[in-house]
Amino acid sequence: MATIEVNGKAVELDEEGYLTELKDWSKEAAAILAGQDDIELSDSHWEVIKFLRDYYDEYQIAPAVRVLTKAIGKKLGKDKGNSKYLYELFPYGPAKQACRFAGLPKPTGCI
Amino acid sequence: MEDEVIKKFLYVNRKAPYGTIYALESLEVVLIGAAFDQDVSLAFIDDGVYQLKKDQKTSVDSGAGMKNFSKTYLALGDYDVNKIYVDKASLDERGLTADDLMELVYEDEDDDYKEKSSISIVNQEEIAQLMEQQDVVLSF
């Protein structure tokens, strides 16, 4: 099982690089996971990550990309609720990659 | 995409939410299937009506000891799954009414995104008709 070191503590990842335990998440962990994909997290990234964590907290699932795009548009404005904007931030897929940074499981329905 | 075939899918849920994996599996299939833009309806019959019950308690102390996934039903509207049929006789037999169920809603794009209820309480004849209209019926 792969692990990353966050603040001197080993944190476990599953075979696809997602945190195995929700409670292991921290901002530091997110930054390390993003670093693995050569991404430096900006405020725009954090905004989406926070949105995903709130969504998960409310509904107990990570939203599919279509749902995420629509919901972001509603909450953060139309200029952000489109796939172009979200793919620029998360080139490996806004749902898949952003959920990984947010410490959530892979979105339901994501293969 | 004019030549895309849209089929009518009905997911029939008859089992209590916890104790078996059927309810959770059904919900996951519905969410995954929602990505394919099909015409989806859900029916809740027999103990299946408990899946939509408000205020579910699932701690080990309460006896269930499973993850409480009931809040996920509230996301169905976001997934454009907004035809949810609940069998009235099954509610009656269990001493439940529509007020005991979670408020599942969706935003109607054709009506200025007004929030509307996704739940219809139906009798057995209506459920039979509903099943008759489907291309695919999946039972959980």
Image (spheres, grey):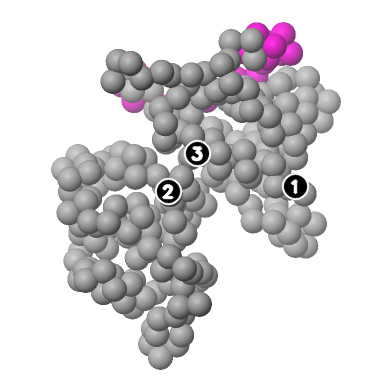
Where residue B61 sits in the image (x, y, percent)? 77, 62
Which quadrant holds the N terminus of chain B?
top left
Task: State yes or no: residue B94 in magenta.
Answer: no
Where residue B16 sits in the image (x, y, percent)? 75, 40
Q: Decide if residue B121 is on the left or right side of residue A81.
A: right
Q: Which residue is mark 2?
A: A110
Q: Decide if residue B50 is on the left or right side of residue A46.
A: right
Q: Decide if residue B140 is on the left or right side of residue A99.
A: right
Place residue B62 in its image quadrant: bottom right
Which quadrant holds the C terminus of chain B?
top right
Q: Which residue is mark 3?
A: B31
Kind of residue at disc 2: Cys
Residue extending farthest bottom? A8
Circle 2/circle 3 CB separation < 8 Å: no
Give the spatial CA distance, label 1 vs label 2. 24 Å
Over which residues does the magenta segment extend? B111-130
Q: State which mark lies toward you, 2 or 3.
A: 2
Q: Which residue is mark 1?
A: B20
Q: Decide if residue B97 is on the left or right side of residue A67.
A: right
Give the spatial CA distance, label 2 vs label 3. 10 Å
Circle nearer the N terminus (3, 1): 1
Q: Between B34 and B59, which is closer to the camera in this rendering?
A: B34
Kind of residue at disc 3: Leu
Q: Residues within 10 Å of mark 3 (few under 14, many from 20)?
A: many
Q: State which mark lies toward you, 1 or 2.
A: 2
- Residue occupying the point 78% across, 24% down: B90
- As helix, strand or loop, the secondary structure at mark 2 comes to loop
- As helix, strand or loop, the secondary structure at mark 1 comes to loop
Residue extending farthest right? B93
